[in-house]
Amino acid sequence: MAAKKRRRYTRYTRDDTYRALYAHQEQLEIQLVADSVHGNRLSVKSKKYGELDVVVLAKSSQWYLYSLNAMTWKHGIEAAMVGTHDSCLPVRVLAMDSLQWYEPYEIRFHIAPSDTPLTDAFERRRKTQYGHNVLLGAFMCGRQDAVDRIMTLKSERTRLRYEAEKRKLLKRRRGRPFKV
């Protein structure tokens, strides 16, 4: 039986992120600190930001999936190295697919609602898993453009679903904690 072909957005794994990080150290002007890898955490020296404790994730939306946003968990993570940046995080993010740093609370594209729905660039993207994760992450961080977008949704049910998912992800997930 042939292996199932993975789509672009779902093809990123944590191992792919580690491999890309090792391969592009020089280009990104970063250096991994020797013997600093513990589970999914490592230390990186950057010319721009100095020494950072980072967590390695396949997608930035996993920050919320693994409850790294929980207020009760004092993990000390200063940045996230991700395969693809598909959310809004309160820490710096290095996206390996674009080889670009993102500042805290920064996302890849404009999500504020448009006055003319026909020319709204984000509306079509919002209905994909990628767009959903971007909007949900920005909503969880309290970005005003995300709150405006959610409040202007046509369907009350969709708005309530976003709010329920936000409440769920703000709580600490059950089970063994993510190893950082």
Image (cartoon, rainbow, N blue to C red):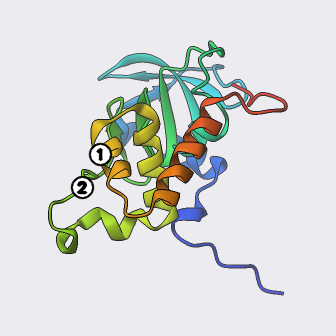
Residue that label 2 marks: 113
Tell me the residue at 40%/41% (across/down). Answer: 138
Residue 16 badge: none
From the viewer's side, name the closer residue of 12 and 48: 12
Q: Position of residue 59 (x, y in %)?
A: 55, 48
Image quarter in which the C terminus is found: top right
Q: CA distance from mark 1 to mark 2?
A: 7 Å
Residue that label 1 marks: 148
Left or right: where 78 falls relative to 161: left
Image quarter in which the N terminus is found: bottom right
Tell me the residue at 64%/53% (across/down). Answer: 13
- Give the secondary structure at mark 1: helix
Q: Quadrant of residue 139?
A: top left
Q: Quadrant of residue 115?
A: bottom left
Tell me the residue at 35%/33% (across/down). Answer: 105
Residue 5 visible in rendering: yes
Q: Position of residue 49 (x, y in %)?
A: 34, 20
Q: Position of residue 81 (x, y in %)?
A: 50, 37
From the viewer's side, name the closer residue of 45 and 131: 131
Q: Earlier in the sequence, mark 1 or mark 2?
A: 2
Q: Position of residue 47 (x, y in %)?
A: 32, 22
Residue type at tag 1: Asp
Callout 2: few (<14), some (14-19), or many (20+) C-alpha neighbours within 10 Å?
A: many
Please say if 168 is above or below 23: above
Please say if 12 is above or below 24: below
Callout 1: few (<14), some (14-19), or many (20+) C-alpha neighbours within 10 Å?
A: some
Residue type at tag 2: Pro
Left or right: where 170 falls relative to 162: right
Asked if the residue at tag 2 contacts the one at tag 1, i.e. Cβ–Cβ closer than 8 Å, the answer is yes
Q: Quadrant of residue 107?
A: top left
Tell me the residue at 22%/69% (across/down). Answer: 117
